[in-house]
Image (tube, grey):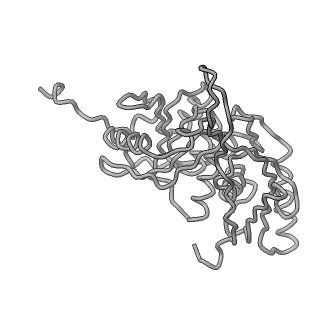
Amino acid sequence: MNPRQRPAITHASRPLTFDVEAINERGEMVPTAIAGENPLTLYVDKREIVTLMTLGQAPEALALGYLRNQRLLQSIEEIAAVQVDWETDSVVVTTRKATDAQARARAAGMADKMKKRTVTTGCGQGTVFGDLMQEIDKVSLRDDVRLSEATLYALMEQVRKHETIYKSAGAVHGCALATNEDGASRILSFVEDVGRHNAVDAIAGQMWLEDIDGSDKIFYTTGRLTSEMVIKAAQMAIPFLVSRSGLTQMGHSIAQKIGITMLGRATGKHYLLFTGRQRFVRSVSPTLIA
């Protein structure tokens, strides 16, 4: 991305955990870490869009990813600044100057998408604007990339060793964007939030901001694979979707329609491959060769 077109952004992460006192089963008072939760109201050019409940780890990326995944703005180049102010619990996205006609078209498009709201199964109830399937029909994922079983295991080992808020405080979901290398994987970004839909949006925002191509990457989530998660991964052009949890019928149906390679119940050396089998390469066991 041309540096002159990069939005000006704040870096206003909130404290992620807080210590409170709790009484355990033995009647002892013990200091206990709990996850933060903050309301964050998103504005675009003074227009209120939505209030998100968030951990506050990456609020600027969350705002960008939300706008990207909801298709409320079409390009990062449209955005001049992203400013988070926790005194007012708000994030203000300012778009670049446009002609009157462009501004009217942008406002009309945003208003049209916001007319239809679908409450999703996201933690804390996520909201998707517009027709859920309208954009998906336009998605075309790469079919010349493969995910090996060895790379999958390498990713799960990286996730297992990653220091997380969940390990200390619980109550959050985590999402990771990872490389797909020959028998190896590196975590490029790991975001946790009180809702998995927020975590995936924050990673989408980071990818938008840093101009990261998702067409050969792996997306990992600790949460279940619902229709919303599948759609967002597809919108980021990511062909591989992995979860340690299960999936829903609609998530499975959309993944089949798109052709995304989706694996669930992935922990240790166990996984279930549900869709997109053509991209997955299993290791050949020596006992099968003999």
- Image height check: is 84 above or below 165? below
Residue at the spot x=70%, y=31% of the render?
121
Q: Position of residue 82 (x, y in %)?
A: 73, 65
User: Most extreme residue toward the front, as rendered?
Assistant: 28
In this orientation, which residue lies closer to the viewer: 135 or 87?
Answer: 87
User: Most extreme residue toward the top, as rendered?
Assistant: 25
Quick one: quadrant of the C terminus? Answer: top left
- Image height check: is 36 above or below 59? above
9 to the left or right of 176: right
In this orientation, which residue lies closer to the viewer: 254 or 51?
Answer: 51
Residue at the spot x=72%, y=55% of the render?
67
Residue at the spot x=50%, y=42% of the render?
220
Quick one: quadrant of the N terminus? Answer: bottom right
140 to the left or right of 97: left
Q: Position of residue 262 (x, y in %)?
A: 48, 35
Report how many numbered discs are placed on residues in the image.
0
Q: Quadrant of residue 276?
A: top left
Q: Position of residue 41 (x, y in %)?
A: 81, 52
Q: Quadrant of residue 133?
A: top right
In this orientation, which residue lies closer to the viewer: 64 or 15?
Answer: 15
User: Most extreme residue toward the bottom, as rendered?
Assistant: 4
Q: Position of residue 222 (x, y in %)?
A: 54, 36
In this orientation, which residue lies closer to the viewer: 29 or 246?
Answer: 29
